[in-house]
Amino acid sequence: MKTFAFATGMEFAAPAVDVLAEQGTPPALLIGYPPSLQHRSGYAPLQEASVRHGIPLLETADINDGRAYDEVMGRGIDLLVVAGWSQLVRDPLLSLPPLGAIGLHPTRLPEGRGRAPLPWTIIKGLDTSAVSLFYLDAGADTGEIIAQREFSVSRRDDVSEVYRKVTEINIELLAKYIPLLLAGQVVARPQPSGGSWWERRRPEDGVIDWSRPASEIYDWVRALAAPYPGAFTSFGGRRLWVHTADLVGWGETQAPAGTILAPVWSTGTAGVLVACGEGLLVVRSVQWEGEDRRDALAMLESGELPAGACLGT
């Protein structure tokens, strides 16, 4: 019987293992990140899934350090499935499984190769994208396409909602195609020529530029929401994270960009109206670095963020 190893450290991994086990195609080996890497966006441990289904687990920060190769070789693994791993899988591990290695990437390849695909999807204003299931090769997201599933991106979605949609598709694709791959019943196709490369994003790249149009800042905030590090600004020499905001579809002001204009009352999460380079934004949920999340209006009322003050200073 053909077997596969599943290497991942992301939140959808354990539910995917549950589904695969329930349909009778459990992984023969799990490869996950150690707890020391739990600070990474979207990290989720695999220990419980390993115990629940009696699947051996290798925890490693470096999939190419030789231990994964030894496990795959020693267990006679036929297929390697890699999803949400921050490293490229390289030889000799890459070429070891007889049925190859496959990966998942939440863009419509060849568009959007590279890092941080979900934040970039929102920042770039895409209203549709796709999850690509493909064979891994020596390049980054360049292998032959096995399948693609489209998903929509609403202007009301933050990145956690897009992540949820992608998670469902990831599990669906793995559940459908792993049995076919193990049975040798999949025909892949080369990626079209061209494509694009999306750069890596670091936490410090989340700074808000209030001189930009309000529509772009709105996309910026929702693109960097949890589980990603978040968008932030500064005030009084302190970093202020902006977790949620609403776009105002009309209205202009002569106030400098970043100026807190007025309170916005609500029976839900209240906020403050902020001037942007073009248009207005309602900033709702914020957090001083090292403190708890709070309503922006509560900070205005306390005098921490007074009307007339300018964010970004």
Image (cartoon, helix red, strand yellow):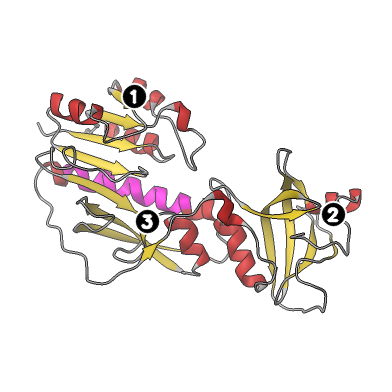
Give the spatial CA distance, label 3 vs label 2: 38 Å
Mark 3 belongs to which amino acid? Pro
Question: Does residue 6 appear in this view?
Answer: yes
Residue picked out by circle 3:
106
> Per the image, is 300 magenta?
no
- Image point (31%, 24%), residue name: 57
Q: Quadrant of residue 275?
A: bottom right
Mark 2 belongs to which amino acid? Leu
Which stretch appears magenta?
163-179
Principal SS element in the magenta part?
helix
Q: Residues within 10 Å of mark 1 (few under 14, many from 20)?
A: some
The image shows residue 216 at horizontal and vertical percentages of: 60, 70
- Image point (72%, 51%), residue name: 285
Quarter of the image with the N terminus in it: top left
- Label 1 residue SS: helix
State yes or no: discs 2 and 1 in contact (Cβ < 8 Å). no
Q: How many marks?
A: 3
Would residue 188 be found to the left or right of residue 274 on screen?
Answer: left
The image shows residue 294 at horizontal and vertical percentages of: 76, 45
> Mark 2 or mark 1, which has the lower sequence index?
1
Q: Nearer the viewer, mark 2 or mark 1?
A: 2
> Per the image, is 171 magenta?
yes
> Mark 1 or mark 3, which has the lower sequence index?
1
Residue picked out by circle 1:
50
Disc assigned to residue 305: 2
The image shows residue 59 at horizontal and vertical percentages of: 35, 26
